[in-house]
Amino acid sequence: MIGTILWAIIGGAIIGVLARLILPGRQNISVLLTVVVGIVAALIGGLIATWLGVGKTNGVDWIRHGIQIALAVIGVYIAARATSGHGRPAGTTRM
């Protein structure tokens, strides 16, 4: 149980960082939010890969990891867009 949680955090951190590297431009989100998005993307991507029948293969599960990273890119993009106006007074614009 502890090992599964630890690997989810480590894998989520790696997937979240890869998503931030793939996504062009600057994402103004915290490291914690990046890890959370990565963990969620890893879990959902694993479920989708299992549903498609490619969750467990002999060797490296490239399709599963591709799905997880794609979901993480989408998640980081959404998180960056959702938090881009955070902290500014209402009615002000970004210059």
Image (tube, rainbow, N blue to C red):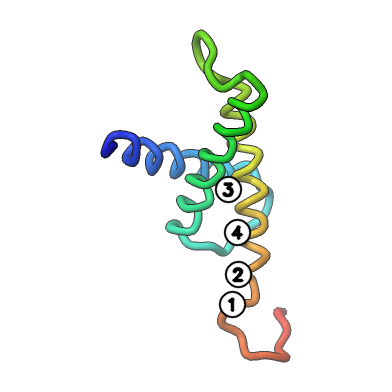
Residue under circle 1? 86
Q: Is residue 62 above or below residue 1?
A: above
The outermost residue toward the left is 2
For disc 3, the marked residue is 20
Instruction: Answer with mark 1 or mark 4, whichever residue precedes in sequence.
Output: 4
Residue 76 appears at what percent x and percent y? 61, 53
View extreme (front): residue: 51
Residue designated by label 2: 83
Look at the image and tell me in which quarter the C terminus lies: bottom right
Residue under label 4: 27
Badge 4 density bin: few <14, some 14–19, many ≥20, Cα 10 Å: some
Residue type, mark 4 in image: Gln
Q: CA distance from mark 4 to mark 2?
A: 10 Å
Q: Nearer the viewer, mark 4 or mark 2?
A: 2
Amino acid type, residue under disc 1 in the picture: His
Establish if 63 lies above or below 48. Answer: above
